[in-house]
Structure formats: structure tokens, C-alpha cells
Amino acid sequence: MTKNSEVWITGIGLISSLGEGTDTHWQALGNVPVAAPVINSEEIAPYSFHPLSEPDWANQISRRDKRQMEPWMQIGTYAAGMALDDAGIKGDEGFCSTMDMIVAAGGGERDIETDSAIHEDALHANERDSLLNERLSNDLRPTLFLAQLSNLLAGNISIVHKVTGSSRTFMGEESAGISAIQTAAARIRSGQSNHMLVGGAYSAARRDMMLTFELGHYLWTDPPVGVAARVKSGNGGIILGSVGVFLVLESREHAEARGKKPYARIDNVVADHGSRVEGGAKKRGTAMRECLKAASDVPVLSAATAISDIYHEEMAVLGADAPVRCYGNQFGHAVEAQFPLGVALAALSLSNGTFYPPFEDGEIESGGNNKQVLVSCFGHWRGEGMALVSSVAGDQT
Amino acid sequence: MSEQYNDHKGRPVVVITGMGVVSSLGTGKQENWANLTAGKSGIHRITRFSTEGLRTTVAGTVDFMDVDPLSAPALSYALADTASGEAIDEAGFANGEFPGPLFLAAPPVELEWQHRFDIYQKPVKSGATGYDKMLESVRDRKREDMFELIQFGRTADLLAEKYHTRGLPISLSTACASGTTAIQMGVEAIRRGECTSALCVGTDGSVQIESLVRFSLLSALTTQNDEPEKAAKPFSNDRDGFVMAEGAGALVLESLESATARGAKVLAIVRGCGEKADDFHRTRSSPDGSPVIAAVQRGLDDAGVDSSEIGYINAHGTSTPENDRMEYNSLKAVFGDAIHQLPISSNKSMIGHALTAAGAIEAVFSVMTIREGIIPPTINYNNPDPDIPLDVVPDVSRKANVDNVLSNSFGFGGQNACLVLGRA
């Protein structure tokens, strides 16, 4: 294909522990002093998490629709609506019915009470199989399946916000978010799509979701400290965070035709996969960093999870002199949504003309390059990706 | 680039150079095709777990794979691996070196009940119960095996490592349209010029107790358990739900230029893909069928193929009351009265509904229909639905010269995707 459109970010929907909306987040993070992270360490002790700042759900989702969704779907559907509002296209049927969508999703939120009752009763049951059949048939809420199935976040966005051009869901932890942004940008660049909605959501305040990480001992169980501090202590560990983030991407021509100014431009997204033994991630990361051809003083937003081995490899790629902000410090780790979150934060800082002050002791000041931001994401277990996001200031017609 | 390698829109022509399949009818194209064209059913009584007290006790499980210990993710990988190996071999790539990306349609994964019981029965010091006990149990004893099993990206990771596919593999879900979406994404990547080949796979090995109960609670499954092989009866008047099934389909897509350059045999052309999301309901389609109509129309437009050039439709045909009626009404809107003369059959009458894998498996069978000149039948068609007056190729396969096939896939969450596959 000969077409080579610029990929503009023209809408951001963001909700997290810090509140909702781009202005709120910029006020919290863009200026000194940076707002303290909001962390709950009591509710699911010994685990800490960044709880969602509860929005007025009715702003984006009717009560009737909200009841059909588990929390991560509600968070995502809310953020998707915010992104459409922000882009100025909410309720525009012509726009939304031709809009393509990629959602990075996990899923699997459980009915904790039903599970727990079955677990306990099975301890004392003679016939565990018949107990299971009977209890699942009688106790499972019929609609739970639809409230937690991976592709139903996209399904709910179609229903609630009428985005129906196309609908695809990517899975696979952090990699899902990387591929979602990469594919969405590639489709716009090539002319396969003119406007896309892309993003993800994660609900951290859940024992069932924490269990999936703790099976592999990936969670931080000591009192909460920053990413670098957790890494310094030994193996490190993840602190999860609730985040919903969606971006509206448009081709430059499409945005200009409707007079829409962008936050920023996605120049390139690269991603790779392979063995994590013997510095494999560092080797792939170095190649990706070179492929992006970013200047050495470009500031970096890192999705670092604070798993020590992979943290060290990522930082070796980014370089000791680079101004790196580990945004997990402020948001926690939002898994599938973490890479889209980084791209959103990059766009926000570029549109404000200045990079973020340090989020944690040891992070160095930005040298003043306010034209580009590199977003880096090394998954907690597999998958690596990077995006280069650029300012369009002085570049608009 | 020479014009002979471009399609009607100036994009690279995308062809299929390798295919692999596993279903309840067997392993590999040959065994599957022999059974499918003989009108055999792969549906049987479930023996994998106790079906005591369940409303549905039949499925198209794949019970002949060597997977131990058995779990949905482990079986899904084994099925995908078997189908991928067959496809890559046929395409003629040196073993273990696939030169393009992987697009994998895979079922969502979760801890299964055997895992939950295993974790919960370990005593914990604090005396906690519920999920606090689950968390304490695994804090005391790391369960790396279970951790890996429920990583959503794991099946793709394993395939990518085994076949050395390029870049970051994509795991995707569009519910029961997933297999078709995987092919569509491969087509798009080749058309963008990002790669000259792509491995597109749909796999599903997730018939287990909770998934069966969940679909059952949504009233999606048949309860006609007495004769399992007769439970799936698409387009029949007494159809009452789909039969869950397992399997995998894998296709090697390649630009025509690449296939020609390396002298690969071209099995078929992927002429076009169409997609449209529905905003009506989480499980039901818009009553006017407009999203399905749009998906079919977009597929034809993308292919540059007129509806009169379609020689056979590989239906989604799940055997649920709603799907089959909606599929007919939508096709009638696109094809007009010609739809009543056009052969259309449902592979699901024999292999059941392989969910995430269905679109990929049915794409393989659609290509074989073109290549072999035989249309597989819709079996169990003893009681035609008078409101669906279609030529469903009842019960017996039929010789036919088919140049273009339309293959439909629809899923929960408003997912609708179509492929137009053509003779090479």
C-alpha cells in the first residue's frame, strides 16, 4: 500500500485512582509537586492496589447497562465514552457507526461468593463432581458469563456508545495493549481505517484477579513503595491499579477535514516476543529502540512492573542518562491497559509542551526535549513493545 | 510490483498455501474431509467429566489428543499445534522457521475447578476462608504451572516459539467469529505490506464443566441428548440450540507474489473479508439483520465479487432457533430470491460448534469444497423449517463446481465477520 497517513490522537478517555479526565490527570502529574499516589493497603492485605476513583457512572453508562457488566467492563466502557466525548464525536452516528475498534482485554472476573461457597463445601463432599454440577447449575448467575467474557467489553462499547464499524478484542496481558495500539496505528497509516477507538481497562480491587498473579508470586506484599524501591529490595513485585483508558485515533486528513486538533501523533510502534533467558528481552529491546530512531535525550514513559529481572533489562535498554518515568508509581499496573495508558500520558504531556517531573527518587529531570516521548513496555512475563509519540505543535494547517 | 500480483483495488493478492485441521471427526484434512463428505457426525456423549444432573450431555469434544494433565489451555494448544504443523508442512516452509506473524484466535482462559480445589484444600496458618485462603495458599506454595496455564497469551507464545513466527504474536477473540477474524487480520497485514506471509489459527479445547453450564444457563445449547449424532440440526424446525465442540483450523496466508516466487502450490485465494459490529444486544442480533447484511455486503465488496458469483455458502448455521432464521433473512436481503437456489450447508451439523475455532475450521472446509468439487451436507435435516426455504444440501454431499465461497461467522457481543474464498 502506498498510502502513508499520519496517525493523530484526537481523543483521550482516562479514569484511574487519580480521578477522571485529561485535565485532572495533568494537574496531578504535570507539575511539581506531583500528587501522591492513591493506594489501598488494607482491604486485601498484604496486597496493595490503586483503587478506582469512583465516577458518576451515569455520565457514560445507564444503570440498566451497568448492571450487565463486571467492574473492568464498566471502567472500560466509561473510559471509551470519555474518549468519544473528548474527540467531540459522542453520539455522532455517522462517525461512530463507521469507527473501527480494538480492545485489549483480559476477563475472568468471578462470582467470589459462589466460588467460595463451592470451594468450602467441596472440602466436605463425598461426591465432588456431583456437588459441582449441582451448584454450578443452580448458583451461577446466567448473565455472569456475558459480564466477564473478554470480547464483551467491546460488545458493551458497541451497545452503549454505538461504535459499530468493526470490533476486535486482543488478549494476552501487556502484549494485548501493545498489539492493539500497534495494529490500530498501522490500519490508519495504511488507509485501512480512518478513525479508530483503541484502549483497555483493568479492575485491581479483586482477589480473583490478584490470585492469577500470585500463583507465580508476582505481587508485592510489603508496605507500598515506588517501582525502583521495590526492585532494589530483591525480586521486586507488582502493585496492581485500576485504570480505564481509550484513545481516538484518526488519520491526519480525517481530523483536519473536521477541524479537530490532535494531542499528538503516533510515529511508530514496534513490538517483539521471544525467550526471556540470557538477556533476550534486552537484546530485543535494544533492537526496538534503534528501530524507532529516537534521539538519545527523548524522555521515556516506562510501564515497568517492578519485576526486578525484567526491570533491569528494560532500564539497560533505555540508558542510565534517559529521563524515565515509571508511571506504575502513580497508577499501579493495569496489565492490558498499561501500554495504552503510557501512550495517553505521552500525548497529554506533548500537548502541554512539557514532560513530567520525576515520579520517584532517582528519576532524573528531563533535558527539555518536548517534541517526542518514547513509551516502553516490557511485560511482566512475556512480550515487549515501544511507541514513539510526537508533538504536532506548529505542524498543523 | 507487477499488476498480476494485485487485486481489483491495487492491493497484494492474498492466497492460501497451507491448511491444517483437527475436529471431533479426526486429525488432518484427509480424515476430516472423508468423514465430512460421508455425512458422519462427530458428536457424542460427554465422557470427559460427569454430566450428572446437566441439561446437556453431548458435545463434539476432541478426545484423541495426547494431553496430560488435561485442561482447556493445554488442549487448545495441542489442537492449535497439530493444525499449524499440518498447514506449515503443506506450505513447504522448512520445519520450525515460519517467516511471518501469528494471529491466533484462542478461548479466554481461567483456573479450572480441579485447580481451584487443589489450591483450596491446602490448609493455611491463618484459618482464612474464601479467596483470602486461596491467596494465602498460593503465597505459601508457588504454583508456577497454574500461573503459566492461565496467561491469556500463553498458547500464542508456545506456538510462536515452536514455529519461530515473527514479531509479537496476536491472541484475539471475537467470540464465535474469532477464527474468521484471525484470517482477516492476516489478510490485512499482508495487504499493508508488513509481511508476505501469516499464520492464522483458530483453536478451542474448552469443553469443561463450567463452560458447558454457562452456555446452558444462557439457553444456547441443545438439550436433545438421546441420540448425540442427531443433536445438531441446523435449519430444521425442531432445532433447539448448538452443540459445543472442539478443534482447530490453521491457514498459511501468503502474498501471491511470494507464493509464486518460491514455487508454492496455491490452494485458494482469500478474495475479501467483511465485518460489522452490532449494537443491539449482548447475545441477540438486530431484528432487521442490518449488521449481518452489512458484513456480507462488505465481504463481497472487498472481494470485488458480485453475489451472483458466489457458488456456495458455508453457513454459520449453529442450529439455534435465532441464528439460523436471522442468517437466512439476512442472506435473502443480500442475494434476493437467488438465495433459494444457492447451495448452503452447515459443517456444524457434523462437527458441532467449535466456538473460537469455528471460523478457521470452516474456512479450511470451504477451500476443500472448491478444490475437491464436493459440497459437504447439512445432516439431520429431517424436518425442514418452512420459514427457511434454503437448499441446505440435505444429508448427502453433492458434487459441484464452486468458484467462490462465502463463509459466515457470528458471535456474542455483536460480532459479525465474513470471508469470500475463491478458486486459485
Image: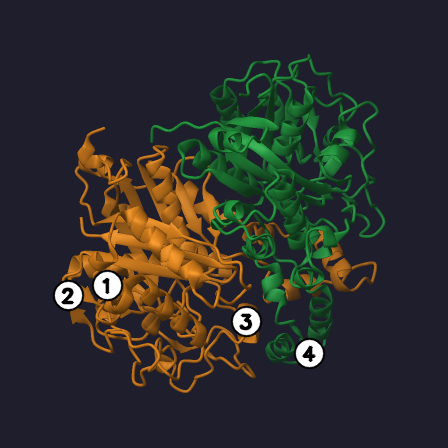
Residue A199 is situated, as x and y percent measured from the top left of the image, at 59, 42
**Residue drawn at 63 percent across, 52 percent down:** B143
Query: Is disc 3 placed on a helix, strand or loop?
Result: helix
Distance from disc 4 to disc 1, alpha carbons, whole Å, reads 54 Å
Q: Colour of chain B?
A: orange
Q: Earlier in the sequence, mark 2 or mark 1?
A: 1
Q: Are marks 3 and 1 on the same chain?
A: yes
The quadrant in which residue A312 appears is: top right
Nearer the observer: mark 4 or 3; the answer is 3
Residue highlighted by disc 4: A125
Q: Please, is residue A99 above or below residue A351 in the view?
A: below
**Dot 3 and dot 1 residues touching (CB under 8 Å):** no
Q: Earlier in the sequence, mark 3 or mark 1?
A: 3
Distance from disc 4 to disc 3, alpha carbons, whole Å, reads 18 Å
The quadrant in which residue A308 appears is: top right
Along the viewing direction, whichever of B88 and B310 lies nearer the viewer: B310
Query: Is disc 1 placed on a helix, strand or loop?
Result: strand
Nearer the observer: mark 3 or 2; the answer is 2
Residue highlighted by disc 2: B400
Amino acid under disc 1: Tyr
Residue B331 is situated, as x and y percent measured from the top left of the image, at 33, 65
Distance from disc 3 to disc 2, alpha carbons, whole Å, reads 41 Å
Residue B304 is situated, as x and y percent measured from the top left of the image, at 26, 47
Nearer the observer: mark 3 or 1; the answer is 1
**Dot 3 and dot 2 residues touching (CB under 8 Å):** no
Query: Is disc 2 placed on a helix, strand or loop?
Result: loop
Residue highlighted by disc 1: B312
Distance from disc 2 to disc 1, alpha carbons, whole Å, reads 9 Å
For the question of whether residue B78 can be seen, the reply is no
Amino acid under disc 2: Ala
